Image (cartoon, helix red, strand yellow):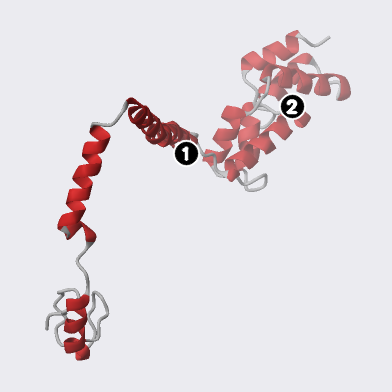
Amino acid sequence: MICPNCGSDTGNSRFCPECGADMSKRSSLKQEQKKVKKPIFKRWWFWVIAIVVIAGIAGGSQPENDDIPQQDSVFQGPENNTVGQEPEVTQEPEAPSVPQEYLNALAKAQSYSDNMHMSKKGLFDQLTSEYGEGFPPEAAQYAIDNVQADFNQNALEKAKSYYYNMNMSKQAVWDQLTSAYGEQFTHDQADYAIANLK
């Protein structure tokens, strides 16, 4: 069954799925449709008026032409704004998003480095240990890569603690600094620490 209102095929439905017309009132709809006016752009006089208006704009005086650039600038403004805004919108998501857990690991690493003067390896082990902080290795590595630490200075601070507070020899301090069971500083960092003990 064809809807007399919109021309859609309604099947056996009582209501048209497109326009919602009641198909049981087809005869009244047909009469109403006869009364419905054509769209304005299908009327002959619309096109006559449109042509006259266009001809008037094209052959108008200079002041009218002055108005046209103003209209163009109005249209260019939003386009320029849109073009200007698009890079800003696309640039914001381009910034790398760091997971919160990585930032937490970095904060812990900074705290251990500043207060306990730990080595890079010691920090990593502390961050990933199930008896320590329990961070995943990726978060711990991010923290190690981004921590603000001078590991030579950390080694020196540890060496001072062992040398002055625990009265250890320089060789014992060096061994403690480089031991896999101790502070885990590199040999170069331990050398720097021992060389700067006073």
Q: Residue furthest front?
A: 61
Quadrant the C terminus occupies = top right
Q: Residue furthest bottom?
A: 24
Q: Which amino acid, mark 1?
A: Pro
Camera-side residue of 62 and 184: 62
Q: Secondary structure at mark 1?
A: helix
Camera-side residue of 188 and 150: 150
The x and y percentages for residue 126 are 65, 38
The x and y percentages for residue 185 are 65, 23
According to the picture, the residue beneath numbered tag 1 turns out to be: 93
Specify the label residue 47 is tagged with: none
Q: Is residue 53 left or right of residue 149?
A: left
- Asked if marks 2 and 1 touch (Cβ < 8 Å), the reply is no
Residue that appears at 27% across and 79% down: 20
According to the picture, the residue beneath numbered tag 2 turns out to be: 117
Camera-side residue of 30 and 157: 30
Mark 2 vs mark 1, CA separation in Å: 36 Å
Corner quadrant of residue 184: top right
Q: Secondary structure at mark 2?
A: loop
Residue that appears at 21% across and 43% down: 52
Question: In the displayed structure, would residue 110 be above or below residue 33?
Answer: above
Corner quadrant of residue 75: top left
Question: In the displayed structure, would residue 101 be above or below residue 40?
Answer: above
